[in-house]
Amino acid sequence: MNATGGFGGRRGIHGRFFRFILAAFAVLILGPFLVSGLGSWLGARFTGIFFREEVSSREEELRNSLVMLMVENSILREEKMKADRYRMLLGISRVEDRKAVPARVLYRSEGMVTGTMVLDRGREHGIVENSVCISAEGLVGVVSRAWESTSEILPITNPSVNVSCVTWPSNAYGILQSSSNGSLEMVHVDLAQEVAVGDMVFTSRFGGVFPDGLLVGTVTGVMPGEPGLAMRLSVEPAADFRSTGEVLILLPRDGSGNRVP
């Protein structure tokens, strides 16, 4: 019995060992395929949850609504920026009872000295010759020609434009004009006035065309003019004529001092 039992025990041990070896080989050979298959199945499940191609009509409706809201929000943001800019334009003018027409620059002709700007507003919007053009930064120029739906602006860098100006806080009066290279100078300035670099330059009430109090620029240099008579001031314009895109047109008054309708 002991011999038989011993033999049976050894055969049982050998059988279990053999099955263990087979199982080990099966894991080594089939394991990577099983793991890969499980990973692919789980990945497909998660992809189906988060990135499935088929969506319900309700989800599609929500997506379209979200896109429309984003577009409307962008449009409203742009309109708010325009409104803020126009409020700034109106705020820099200290002119009372002046009708103002907002406009956009359509294009510019070549040249900073003799160049012009064409706006998208004309006679049908109330624009007439000698209307004053300003930007958020300051004085731009004057309307030289007005057509039915467009108008042409001569910038203050054009030699044909002269502007009566006053400095602040030195309170020196003179005439702003453009030199041959397009730089601005204020001439016929009284020698008795103590003008300093950094003084601000505004339109004065003596010009006739340009209303009083519009920002023109800043004094960047003080130079002698005609010997013993006057001095000249170099002026950096406040407006950037190359990048100005939106402006306001201040309509002139008629001979009785009333606004042009």
Image (cartoon, grey):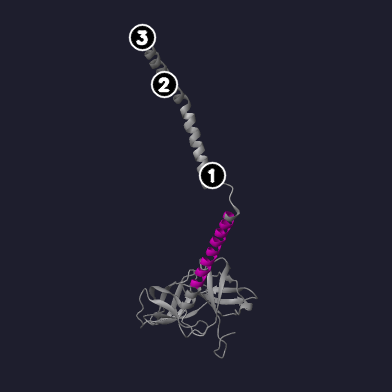
- Residue occupying image coordinates x 44% and y 23%: 23
Provide the major secondary structure of the magenta segment.
helix
Q: What x and y, as percent, mark residue 195?
A: 36, 78
Say what secondary structure mark 3 lies in.
loop
- Residue occupying image coordinates x 34% and y 10%: 2
Say what secondary structure mark 1 lies in.
helix
Camera-nearest residue between 244 and 197: 244
Callout 2, which amino acid?
Phe
- Marks 3/2 in contact by CB < 8 Å: the verdict is no
Rounded to the nearest whole Å, what is the CA distance between mark 3 and mark 2? 28 Å
User: Is residue 194 found left or right of 261 in the rendered image?
Assistant: left
Callout 1, which amino acid?
Gly
Where is 257 relative to 222, above or below?
below
User: Which residue is labeled 2 in the image?
Assistant: 20
Viewer can see residue 160: no
N-terminal of the pair, mark 2 or mark 1, is 2
- The local crowd at label 3, few if under 14, some if 14 to 19, many if 20 or more residues have their Cα within 10 Å, is few
Quadrant where the N terminus lies? top left
Residue 48: mark in rendering: 1
Q: Quadrant of residue 11?
A: top left
Where is 229 relative to 121, above or below?
below
- Residue occupying image coordinates x 58% and y 55%: 58
Rounded to the nearest whole Å, what is the CA distance between mark 3 and mark 1? 65 Å
User: Which residue is labeled 3 in the image?
Assistant: 1
- The local crowd at label 2, few if under 14, some if 14 to 19, many if 20 or more residues have their Cα within 10 Å, is few
Q: What x and y, as percent, mark residue 250?
A: 54, 79
Quadrant where the C terminus lies? bottom right
- Residue occupying image coordinates x 46% and y 28%: 31
Give the extent of the magenta segment.
Answer: 59-85
Camera-nearest residue between 109 and 178: 109
